[in-house]
């Protein structure tokens, strides 16, 4: 997914038990961007809040809204019995 400035954004999560890193500093998935020059930046690492209220395991991809924000979902975590979340994130990484 690219925003209006041409930067690429994506989510990463790999199921537990697989040999790949789950992404993010908490190993519960993350949102990344890459600049035109190839600089990789972690914008947000999931499970940063108490009891993973911000969600874990970002699922599917990101959608760019007409407001310039990104929208996505997580497979688990969240405030309602670990049922996941729907999130809005700014291009700067604010959830």
Image (tube, rainbow, N blue to C red):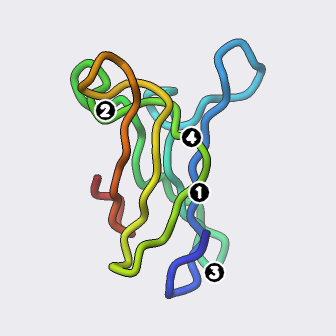
Q: Which marked residue is nearer to the observer: mark 3 or mark 2?
A: 2
Secondary structure beneath label 2: loop
> Residues under labels 4 and 2: Cα distance?
17 Å
Secondary structure under the numbered disc 3 in the rendered image: loop
Question: Residue 67's mark?
Answer: none
Name the residue tied to disc 4. Answer: 59
Q: Looking at the image, do the residues carrying marks 4 and 3 touch, with CB atoms under 8 Å apart? A: no
Residue position for label 2: 48
Query: Mark 1 highlights which residue?
Result: 10
Asked if the residues shown at circle 3 and circle 1 are in contact, with their CB atoms under 8 angstroms apart, the answer is: no
User: What is the crowding at mark 4: few (fewer than 14 residues within 10 Å), some, or many (at least 20)?
Assistant: some
Q: Nearer the viewer, mark 4 or mark 3?
A: 4
* C-alpha gap between disc 3 and disc 2: 28 Å
Mark 3 residue crowding within 10 angstroms, few (<14) / some (14–19) / many (20+)? few
Specify whether 6 is left or right of 55: right
Crowd rating for badge 1 (residues with CA inside 10 Å; few <14, some 14–19, many 20+): some
Q: In this view, does 43 lie above or below 36?
A: above
| Number of marks present in the image shown | 4
Q: Which residue is drawn at 22% across and 22% down?
A: 50
The answer to which of marks 3 and 1 sits earlier in the sequence is 1
Q: What crowding class fits label 2: few (fewer than 14 Cα within 10 Å), some (14-19), or many (20 or more)?
A: some
Q: Which of marks 3 and 2 is nearer the N terminus?
A: 3
Residue farthest toward the bottom in the current orientation of the protein: 5
Q: Name the residue under label 3.
A: 36
From this view, report whether residue 55 is shown above or below residue 5.
Answer: above
Q: Residue at x 46, y 52 (%)?
A: 72
Q: Which residue is drawn at 31% across and 25% down?
A: 52
Mark closer to the chain start, 4 or 2: 2
Q: In the displayed structure, does residue 34 sit left or right of residue 74?
A: right
> Closer to us: mark 4 or mark 2?
4
Under circle 1, the secondary element is strand
Quadrant where the N terminus is found in the figure: bottom right
């Amino acid at each position: 997914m690219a925003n209006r400035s041409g930067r690429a954004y994506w989510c990463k999560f790999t199921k537990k038990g697989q040999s790949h890193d789950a992404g993010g500093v908490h190993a519960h998935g993350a949102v990344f961007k890459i600049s035109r020059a190839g600089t990789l930046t972690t914008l947000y690492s999931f499970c940063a809040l108490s009891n993973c209220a911000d969600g874990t395991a970002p699922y599917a991809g990101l959608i760019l809204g007409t407001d310039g924000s990104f929208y996505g979902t997580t497979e688990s975590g969240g405030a309602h019995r670990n049922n996941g979340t729907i999130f809005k994130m700014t291009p700067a990484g604010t959830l």
